[in-house]
Amino acid sequence: MSIESQLKAQLAENSDIVQSLFDDGSDPDAEYVIEHHFSSTNFDRLEKAAVDAFKLGFEVNDAEEMDLEDGSIIFCFDAVAHHKLDIALLDKASEQLLQLAIKQKVDYDGWGTYYVGDDMDDEDYEDDEEEEDDGFPR
């Protein structure tokens, strides 16, 4: 897939995700934790992508190793931003990060965030972050 078609698909997905969150009642005025996902089978390339994402102003979490169903190993990290669900900001970040991924020959897997609404307060979000892999709170 060409970069133009990848970007076009990502921009459409950005709009769909934001609209779905707002349709579900997520707060349009809240600040969100936006996690842009990267992955690669090559750790060195992924590390270079993480450095580039940091230079663009994103928080970068530690790379994780994951075993895939076929037995292969993949490495991944998130480039994190904090802002409102503003389509222009998300589109700009997606374009920058897709370009970065192509430059470093890693995969940009889009972004995700969490629902923020009246029925969820800050304590609920903090509890979610403190869960271990087994799903039980610490």
Image (tube, grey):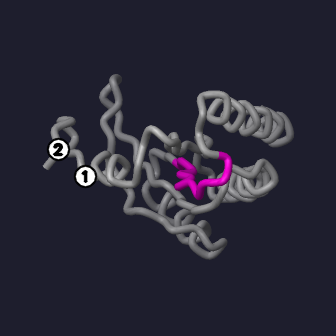
Is residue 124 shown above or below 48? above
Is residue 32 shown above or below 1? below
Residue at image coords 68%, 59%: 100
- Give the class, few, some or many, for how many residues have Cα within 10 Å of label 2's Cα (few <14, many ≥20): few
Is residue 51 shown above or below 111? below
Q: Which residue is mark 1?
A: 130
Q: Which residue is mark 2?
A: 137
x and y, in percent, of residue 70 in the image: 35, 23
Q: Confirm whether the magenta stretch covers residue 37.
A: yes
Residue at image coords 42%, 42%: 120
Residue type for callout 2: Pro
Residue nearest the observer in this picture, 49 or 109? 109
Mark 2 residue element = loop
Residue nearest the observer in this picture, 2 or 136? 136
Q: Which of the two labelled residues, at mark 2 and mark 1, occupies the earlier sequence position?
A: 1
Residue 103 placement: quadrant: bottom right
x and y, in percent, of residue 110 in the image: 62, 42
Mark 1 residue element = loop
Residue at image coords 52%, 65%: 50
Image position of 125 (left or right of 13): left
Q: What is the span of residues highlighted in magenta in the rendered image?
A: 28-38
Residue at image coords 79%, 40%: 11
Which image quadrant: the N terminus? Answer: top right
Residue 18 numbered mark, or none: none
Q: Confirm whether the magenta stretch covers residue 16.
A: no
CA gap between label 2 and label 1 equals 6 Å
